[in-house]
């Protein structure tokens, strides 16, 4: 880990279904990420393939948020403007994973953020019609610095359109973590304005 990077773990995460009354919790309850863990890349980022990612903004439900993706030699960058007059979200997601998540117990993210709260999302497919479950965990970012975030799989919650999904409604084909085939990042923190996230690493541990 280079100087200036912070090490983090989100102990518990809840989907963005109401205003967060505990702002900062995702960045406050933190412990060190240790080098004893052997990371396995879940997406290709060195270099990334632009065609392997999708941008999905709230325009799909009549919203006004804007988001666009770019790539560098070793990262995916997602920037835009969140508009809460409508859906109030913007996201990117991969069209596949390089490894079976059932081998791991957590995901480690290396993120250059904007100081806002984001969610890490897992899905059984990058796109779907009708009902489908998105497994979400919230994490905090730091503006102008790189953060290493460890999210245990126990922190992820099943959601659909921002609402929690009871276990009885989760299809067998969307069981977490074994059935997951896509990872993504969503901003939906109920704050209008510019956002930026640079994804430098997504590893299973």
Image (cartoon, helix red, strand yellow):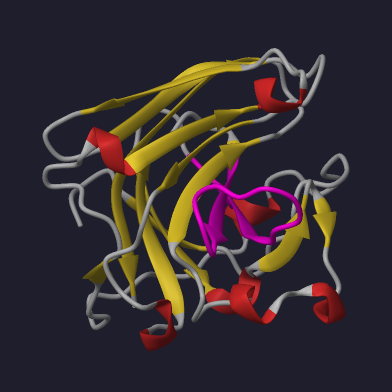
Residue shown at 12%/42% (left/top)? Answer: 47
Snapshot quadrant of residue 15: bottom right
Q: Position of residue 134 (x, y in %)?
A: 65, 58
The answer to whether 178 appears left or right of 96 in the picture is: right
The answer to whether 191 appears left or right of 193 in the picture is: right
Snapshot quadrant of residue 148: bottom left
The answer to whether 185 appears left or right of 132 in the picture is: left
Q: Position of residue 150 (x, y in %)?
A: 44, 66
Q: How many marks?
A: 0
Residue shown at 36%/70% (left/top)? Answer: 33
Against 185, residue 63 (above or below) is above
Closer-to-camera residue (15/99) = 99
> As drawn, which residue projects farthest toward the front?
129
The answer to whether 172 appears left or right of 126 in the picture is: right
Closer-to-camera residue (193/10) = 193
Closer-to-camera residue (198/158) = 158
Look at the image and give the residue range highlighted in magenta: 118-141
The C terminus is located in which quarter? Answer: bottom left
Residue shown at 36%/44% (left/top)? Answer: 111
Residue shown at 38%/64% (left/top)? Answer: 108
The N terminus is located in which quarter? Answer: bottom left
Against 107, residue 66 (above or below) is above
Closer-to-camera residue (149/61) = 61
Q: Position of residue 55 (x, y in %)?
A: 47, 31
Q: Is residue 128 magenta?
A: yes
Snapshot quadrant of residue 144: top left
Q: Position of residue 135 (x, y in %)?
A: 64, 63
Against 26, residue 59 (above or below) is above
> As drawn, which residue projects farthest toward the bottom?
103
């Amino acid at each position: 880990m280079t100087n200036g990077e912070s090490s983090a773990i989100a102990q518990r995460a809840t989907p963005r279904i109401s205003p967060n009354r505990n702002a900062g919790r995702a960045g406050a309850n933190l412990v060190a990420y240790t080098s004893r863990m052997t990371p396995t890349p879940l997406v290709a980022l060195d270099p990334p393939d632009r065609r392997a990612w999708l941008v999905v903004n709230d325009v799909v439900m009549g919203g006004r948020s804007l988001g666009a993706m770019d790539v560098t030699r070793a990262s995916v960058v997602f920037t835009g403007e969140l508009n809460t007059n409508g859906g109030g979200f913007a996201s990117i997601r991969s069209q596949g994973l390089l490894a079976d998540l059932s081998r791991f117990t957590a995901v480690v993210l290396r993120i250059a953020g904007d100081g806002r709260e984001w969610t890490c999302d897992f899905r059984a497919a990058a796109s779907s019609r009708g009902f489908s479950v998105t497994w979400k965990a919230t994490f905090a970012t730091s503006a102008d610095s790189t953060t290493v975030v460890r999210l245990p799989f126990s922190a992820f919650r099943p959601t659909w359109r921002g609402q929690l999904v009871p276990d009885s409604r989760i299809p067998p084909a969307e069981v977490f973590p074994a059935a997951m085939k896509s990872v993504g990042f969503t901003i939906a923190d109920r704050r209008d304005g510019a956002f930026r996230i640079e994804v430098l690493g997504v590893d299973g541990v």
